[in-house]
Image: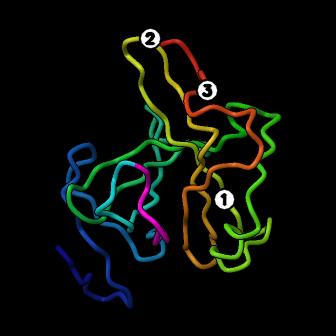
Amino acid sequence: MLRVVAGTHFEEQVVESPVLGRVAVEPARIVEFLEPIAGFPTCTRYGLLPYLQRDGREDPAMRWLQAMDAPYHTFIVADPWSVHAEYEPEIADSDARQLENLSPTDASFYGIMTVARRRGELTINLRAPLVVNTHLRLGKQVVLLNGEYTTSHRVCELP
C-alpha cells in the first residue's frame, strides 16, 4: 500500500508488519538490496527503522529491518561492534564494487539477530553481515573473507 502524505514532498510506503503493526516508512529509510537476503528470495526492499528501548529512547546500536514487500517479515539487526568490539570484517573488492565503490565513510554494517530459544540465547550473524552504502541506500548480505566469525555469535543468555 502506498500513501502520499499531504503537504510533504515525498511519498512514504505503509506496510502491515506482523511484528510492528501498521508502519509508514519514509523513502530515505528504504534500502534496496542488490540480492535477496539468504532465505528470503522474494524481497529486496527493506525499511531500516529505529529500535526503541522500553523508555522510548532510540537504541543507537539496534534497528528494525522491515521488508517492504510480501510477506513483510521483520528482522532485528545490530551494529556488530556493539556486541563484539574487536570485529574486523573483510569484504571482497567485488562486493564493494557492487555497492557502488563502497567507502568506509559510506558503509554501515548490521548483523541479523536471532532468538535461539532451544539454546536459550540471543545470537548475531557476524559471518554474513548486511552491508549498506548509506549514501546510496544500497545493501547486500556479504560473506566475509576472514573466516573467524560465525553465523550465530552468542550475544547473551535469555531469561
Q: Do the residues labelled 2 and 3 touch (CB within 8 Å)?
A: no
- Identify the secondary structure beneath mark 3: strand
In the rendered structure, does residue 96 fall within the stretch colored magenta? no
Which label sits in the foreground, 2 or 1?
2
- Does residue 66 appear to the left or right of 124 in the view shown? left
Whole-percent x and y of residue 57? Answer: 51, 42
Q: Where's the C terminus, which quadrant?
A: top left
Point out the stretch of residues depicted in magenta: 32-38
Task: Determine whether 157 is above or below 122 in the image.
Answer: above
Separation (CA) of disc 2 from disc 1: 29 Å
- The spot of residue 135 in percent (x, y) is 64, 76
Residue type at mark 3 is His
Cα distance, mark 3 to mark 1? 19 Å
The amino acid type found where label 2 is placed reads Arg
| Residue, disc 2 | 119
- Provide residue 25's location: percent of width, then percent of height: 35, 67
Instruction: Quickly name the residue at label 3.
Output: 153
At horizontal 32% and vertical 83% (from top left) the residue drawn is 11
Q: Which amino acid does label 1 sit on?
A: Ser
Q: In this view, does 158 lie to the left or right of 87?
A: left
The circle on residue 108 is 1
Residue 64 in picture, x, y percent from top left: 43, 49
Give the mark count.
3
> Measuring 55% from the left and 56% from the top, which residue is drawn there?
141
Q: How crowded is mark 3: few (under 14 residues within 10 Å), some or many (20 or more)?
A: some
Q: Main secondary structure of the magenta part?
A: loop
Which of marks 1 and 3 precedes in the sequence?
1
